[in-house]
Image (spheres, rainbow, N blue to C red):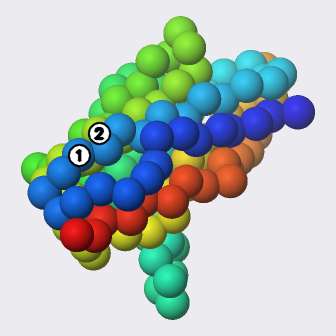
Amino acid sequence: QVQLVESGGGLVQPGGSLRLSCAASGSFFSINTMGWYRQAPGKARELVAVVTSGGSTNYADSVKGRFTISRDNAKNMVYLQMNSLKPEDTAVYCCNAELRLHLGARLSRYWGQGTQVTVSS
């Protein structure tokens, strides 16, 4: 069974920083893309940032220049460094991974439970 577990959320003042971590565990063959999504109250879930196994990244326009996604393939982990946080960044942040359970299997998407990030003075 595959599990994604996030950590690092919390309360931070505007202009502050947080670093989120997500660890993938369980039995699988390989991980393709890993990413972070967020959902604020009353809003749809949105992509924050993704990173491929080769290190290519993509960011939402609203976080470009402030957030940095990275991953450690050896540890099956993905990180999100969030700087210059704004109140509008307040949301539940969820980790996502596309992976193959075994060689030749189709890609499957897995989600973490999410971690709350609150930006407020």
Q: Nearer the viewer, residue 40 or 65?
A: 40
Q: CA distance from mark 2 to mark 1?
A: 7 Å
* Image disc number at residue 27: none
The spot of residue 110 in percent (x, y) is 70, 47
Dot 1 falls on a residue whose secondary structure is loop
Which disc, if any, is residue 81?
2
Vertical placement of residue 35 versus 103, above or below: below
Task: Determine whether the residue tagged by mark 2 lies in a helix, strand or loop.
Answer: strand
Rendered location of residue 52, percent (x, y): 43, 34
Taking the spot 80% from the left edge, 24% from the top edge, the residue there is 26
Q: Residue at x 28, y 70 (%)?
A: 120
| Eye-nearest disc, 2 or 1 | 1
Instruction: Check the image and report above or below for 83 versus 104.
Output: below
Is residue 61 depicted above or below 43 in this figure?
above
> Is residue 39 something one can see in this rendering?
yes
Q: Assess whether mark 1 and mark 2 are in contact (beta carbons under 8 angstroms).
A: yes
Mark 2: few/some/many CA within 10 Å (<14, 14-19, 20+): some
Depth check, front residue: 65 or 84? 84
**The disc label shown at residue 17, or none:** 1
Locate the C terminus by quadrant.
bottom left
Percent position of residue 73, x then y: 50, 16
Q: Which quadrant is home to the N terminus?
A: top right
**Residue found at x 23% / y 46%:** 17
Residue 94 falls in which quadrant of the image?
bottom right
Residue type at the position of mark 2? Gln
Answer yes or no: is residue 33 visible.
no
Residue 18 appears left or right of 30: left
**Which residue lies at the image location 60% right of the left edge and 29% below the top edge?**
23
